[in-house]
């Protein structure tokens, strides 16, 4: 094979000219992709297509955990009526990326084992097919039965359809149909009248990751506008991201307790989550941090009264969270519902390209805060928390340990900020930018470790610095397949606790 | 055992005793107030700034059914617009959500518009089916929080139920995607009459940020009367609970 041909991007670096991205012949592209992804330390962050010069341009972004760089390369097709050799048989992690390209543009992928719709996006190639035409996997049998759940679920949650094939109570196969939540966000990002609208759209991609997506968008725009933000604002964003992580992990611990009928653990953790989101509300007026993050600045600089309240809350909540989790993780009646249930093996997680929590619970040290840090994480030297067993217990324990570690981290950072300020804002009050000039004809990438895993936003600008393509990837895009694998050979009654242990985003996937 | 008792003691009493008068933090973004007249130029600027088209320049007004509560208009014109922490912003009259200049008055529910059977049948017990139709999960989490130990709307007999067959109405979140339109209709049809429709969150009321998206199908809303509009992004649990209490005519 010839020398690999790609351009390297630094996590904190600026954009690259679109023309600087090597364009490979598809055969070279395929062999390079397969070669590079044979390493465990390389995974695919993005692989997508967009209309270009009357045809399509396909961009692949791989993350190299060893060098801490993103590797970008591409191929182009003149005609939109093309069939390519699928890479999925060799690299299963690409299955959904190829399916997305197929759905959006009608590109065929020969030998793709599972070339099914992704989300029935509004501007899909086959407008004649809709949600009711999803081709579910079927097994003809007198012994087996199917169980369909959703799109509307029993609880107050987002919609999605789960189709189980069961042998008695045992799940043989689960297929997850998504797309009910599709709002056309990527297109709205292009039609947006201002940078502000894009920033607000970003924080509404997934309500439980408002800060994560808003930070990713802000970093992308700052990169394209050539803006460097102050150290203190970077600290502030890290605090916001970690508060989001703490709140969700505690909330999901409550939900896991609820799903195994441990009401005590549920109500205590719900109350603890409330204290964290109320701290975010005290800081910026919104319990989910909407409005807190803006490109280039902030409207809500941290002040000493807010930091003091934050420190008190974290101290108290941290203590009480350790007490209740000690209780949870020593109760045999709970452990029997978590331990060895819903296992995803390390090899499975690697092959589907799992990211974030879904990777770390099987012993894969995949954490953008460590491998590709941006902002304040570049100086934090974060060490990821790893679990080995890949079951519900591993995911519950990972949440527990990550919440505690983040509480420590925020306490440490916030105390340091407090020491340097007295009644004045702890961080500088720089006005956000709304419509700065963006570098023209460029490709920019921003990747952040949200609480679920890596969030990626990529933009392409035209000759006048206008955004001509905007790609969003929520970690759920990779990780829904992990849930489908986790419930194989489990009792169907274990599905809720398996589902909740991942808590994946429907709207983040459907966009 | 002793550890559980210890945790229970630490947990203490969490519930908010009076949900009508509870105060939120000063920065909470509730009902805005417009003070003084804005110049035509400034009005047009703010209308252009607003990411969800909630601002009408002439005469100047903010429509809370479209507002995503980002507060950017206040940052641009701090001497003219101020978001208060008044969370009592649910109403059954869509036009009550439009905030005009020099009108610092609470948003109220219009009792004459409430269908008679709502107050006779649901005043003491209201079971609701929630349908997320492309909601971003923040409204859904706040609706769950409305039933938790802090807000505990169950104390008034208000609860979410799993089946539409057991429900007295639907609470819709999200801008209603094309891909969810059919499921929403099926769920509505499965709910026994008389039934309520409550639109929860700015996305549901107007489409919000997504109003211009082609991926939506909001025709469901043209077919039925709406009983309550609850603005917010997301809706605060206190806004939701107070809105429902007003609707069913429940005093506490």
Image (cartoon, rainbow, N blue to C red):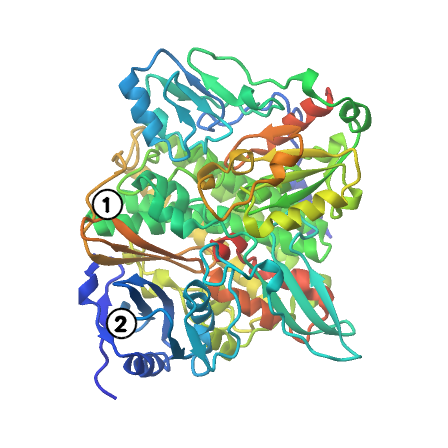
Q: Residue furthest bottom?
A: A1
Tag 1 and tag 2 share a subunit: yes
- The residue under label 1 is A229
| Residue A479 at x, y percent in the picture | 50, 65
The quadrant where residue B244 appears: top right
Residue at (47% x, 25% y) in the render:
B63
Compare marks 1 and 2 and give the one earlier in the sequence: 2
| Residue B164 at x, y percent in the picture | 75, 45
> Where is A18 relative to B85, above or below?
below
Could you tell me if residue B31 is visible in this image?
yes
Residue B1 relative to residue A206: left or right: right
Q: How crowded is mark 1: few (under 14 residues within 10 Å), some or many (20 or more)?
A: some
Q: Residue furthest right?
A: B121
> Where is B237 relative to A65, above or below?
above
Q: Is mark 1 on a helix, strand or loop?
A: loop
The answer to the question of whether label 1 and label 2 lie on touching residues, with beta carbons closer than 8 A, is no
Q: Is mark 2 on a helix, strand or loop?
A: loop
The quadrant where residue B93 appears: top right
Q: Residues within 10 Å of mark 2 (few under 14, many from 20)?
A: few
* Quarter of the image that includes the N terminus of chain A: bottom left
């Amino acid at each position: 094979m010839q020398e690999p041909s790609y351009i390297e991007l630094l996590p904190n670096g600026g954009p690259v000219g679109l023309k600087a991205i090597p364009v490979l012949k598809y055969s070279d592209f395929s062999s390079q992709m397969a070669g590079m992804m044979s390493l465990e330390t390389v995974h695919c962050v993005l692989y997508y297509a967009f209309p270009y010069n009357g045809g399509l341009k396909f961009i692949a972004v791989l993350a190299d955990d060893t060098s801490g760089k993103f590797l970008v390369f591409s191929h182009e097709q003149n005609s939109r009526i093309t069939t390519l050799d699928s890479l999925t048989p060799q690299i299963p992690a690409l299955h959904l990326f190829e399916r997305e390209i197929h759905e959006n543009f009608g590109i065929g992928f020969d030998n793709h084992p599972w070339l099914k719709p992704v989300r029935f996006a509004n501007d899909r190639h086959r407008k004649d097919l809709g949600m009711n035409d999803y081709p579910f996997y079927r097994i003809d049998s007198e012994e087996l039965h199917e169980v369909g759940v959703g799109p509307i679920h029993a609880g107050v949650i987002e919609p999605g359809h789960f189709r189980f094939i069961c042998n008695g109570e045992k799940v043989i196969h689960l297929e997850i149909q998504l797309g009910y939540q599709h709002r056309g966000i990527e297109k709205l990002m292009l039609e947006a009248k201002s940078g502000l609208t894009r920033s607000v759209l970003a924080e509404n991609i997934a309500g439980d990751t408002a800060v994560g997506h808003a930070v990713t968008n802000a970093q992308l725009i700052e990169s394209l506008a050539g803006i460097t933000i102050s150290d203190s604002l970077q600290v502030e964003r890290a605090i916001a991201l970690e508060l989001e992580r703490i709140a969700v992990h505690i909330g999901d611990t409550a939900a896991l307790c609820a799903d195994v009928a441990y009401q005590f653990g549920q109500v205590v953790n719900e109350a603890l989550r409330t204290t964290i989101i109320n701290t975010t509300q005290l800081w910026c007026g919104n319990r989910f941090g909407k409005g807190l993050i803006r490109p280039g600045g902030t409207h809500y600089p941290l002040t000493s009264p807010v930091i003091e309240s934050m420190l008190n809350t974290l101290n108290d909540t941290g203590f009480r969270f350790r007490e209740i989790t000690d209780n949870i993780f020593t109760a045999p009646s709970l452990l029997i519902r978590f331990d060895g249930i819903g296992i995803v093996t390390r090899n499975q997680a690697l092959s589907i390209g799992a990211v974030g929590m879904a990777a770390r619970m099987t012993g894969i040290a995949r954490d953008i805060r460590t491998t590709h840090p941006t902002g304040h994480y570049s100086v934090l030297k974060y060490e990821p928390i790893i679990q080995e067993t890949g079951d519900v217990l591993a995911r519950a324990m990972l949440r527990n340990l990550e919440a505690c570690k983040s509480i420590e981290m925020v306490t440490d950072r916030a105390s340091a900020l407090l020491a340097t300020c007295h009644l004045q804002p702890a961080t500088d009050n720089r006005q956000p930018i709304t419509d700065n000039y963006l570098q023209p004809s460029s490709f920019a990438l921003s990747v952040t470790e949200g609480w679920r895993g890596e969030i990626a936003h990529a933009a392409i600008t035209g000759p006048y610095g206008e955004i001509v393509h905007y790609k969003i990837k929520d970690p759920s895009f990779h990780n829904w397949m992990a849930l489908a694998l986790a419930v194989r050979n489990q009792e169907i009654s274990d599905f809720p606790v398996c589902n909740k242990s991942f808590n994946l985003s429907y709207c983040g996937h459907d966009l | 055992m002793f550890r559980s008792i210890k945790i229970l003691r630490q947990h203490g009493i969490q519930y908010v005793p009076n949900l009508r008068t509870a105060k939120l933090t000063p920065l909470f973004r509730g009902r805005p107030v417009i003070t003084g007249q804005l110049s035509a130029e400034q009005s047009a600027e703010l209308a252009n700034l607003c990411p969800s088209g909630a601002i009408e320049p002439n005469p100047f007004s903010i429509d809370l059914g479209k507002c995503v509560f980002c507060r950017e208009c206040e940052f641009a014109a701090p001497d003219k617009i101020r978001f208060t922490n008044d969370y009592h912003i649910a109403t059954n009259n869509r036009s009550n959500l439009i905030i005009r200049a020099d009108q610092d008055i609470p948003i109220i529910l219009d009792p004459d518009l409430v269908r008679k059977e709502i107050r006779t049948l649901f005043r003491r017990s209201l079971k609701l089916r929630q349908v997320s139709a492309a909601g971003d999960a923040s409204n859904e989490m706040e609706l769950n929080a409305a039933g938790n130990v802090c807000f505990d709307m169950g104390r008034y007999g208000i609860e979410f139920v799993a089946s539409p067959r057991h429900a007295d109405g639907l609470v819709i979140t999200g801008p209603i995607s094309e891909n969810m339109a059919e499921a929403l209709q099926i769920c509505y049809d499965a709910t026994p009459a008389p039934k309520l429709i409550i639109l929860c969150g700015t996305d549901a009321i107007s489409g919000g940020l997504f109003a211009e998206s082609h991926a939506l199908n909001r025709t469901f809303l043209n077919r039925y009367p709406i009983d309550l509009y609850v603005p917010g992004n997301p809706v605060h649990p206190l806004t939701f609970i107070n809105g429902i209490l007003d609707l069913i005519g429940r005093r506490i």
